[in-house]
Image: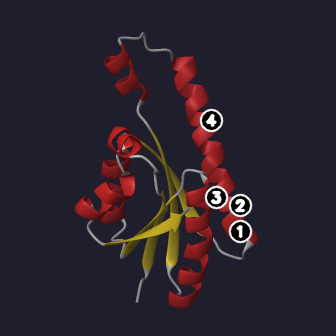
Amino acid sequence: MYKNIVLAYDGSDSGQKALLDCNELAQWSHATLSLVAVMPSTMGFVAMEGSIYDPEVEQRERSRFQAILADGLRRLADTGFTANGELLVGDSVEEITNYARKISADLIVVGHKHLDSWAARWWRGSISSALIEHAPCSVLCVITL
């Protein structure tokens, strides 16, 4: 039985489906829910693109991801669930797995959308696939078509 569930939420259709499916799972297992949103580090963008660091851009991104997290927490509250919310900054897979270790999670729930072309799959990579390889616990991928 799952007692600590981490839900990785990005506000996408697949993330919203994972959020809804997680409700049922949490209700069934009486688990504690932790909702996380991961903001990419703006310093990584600066290094890759040779740009100049702009604190206003970082603040806008932080506000955007805080809104995504607040939306997920509101959606959970609307269905009668209370969850802890945490904004993480960095590489999605690394941050989610580190957070799962920190709270001794039994399960990570993540949304996944199938990409049509092999080029799209290669270019974007798959956070859900990488989580399966690196997570310290079980991973549930909620598929949207």
Few, some or many C-alpha atoms within 10 Å of disc 4 (few <14, some 14-19, many ≥20)?
few
Q: CA distance from mark 2 to mark 3?
A: 5 Å
Q: Are marks 2 and 3 in contact (CB under 8 Å)?
A: yes
Query: In the rendered image of this protein, does residue 119 appear above or below residue 22?
Result: above
Q: Are marks 3 and 4 in contact (CB under 8 Å)?
A: no
Q: Secondary structure at mark 1?
A: helix
Residue on which the image places disc 2: 74
Q: Quadrant of residue 122?
A: top left
Viewer-proximal residue, 144 or 105? 144
Q: Are marks 3 and 1 in contact (CB under 8 Å)?
A: no
Mark 2 is on which residue type?
Arg
Residue on which the image places disc 1: 77
Q: CA distance from mark 1 to mark 4?
A: 21 Å
Residue on which the image places disc 3: 72
State the residue lying farthest toward the front.
117
- Mark 3 or 1: in front is 3
Q: Earlier in the sequence, mark 3 or mark 4?
A: 4
Few, some or many C-alpha atoms within 10 Å of disc 3 (few <14, some 14-19, many ≥20)?
many
Q: Secondary structure at mark 3?
A: helix
Q: Are marks 2 and 1 in contact (CB under 8 Å)?
A: yes
Mark 3 is on which residue type?
Gly
Residue on which the image places disc 4: 63
Q: Earlier in the sequence, mark 3 or mark 1?
A: 3
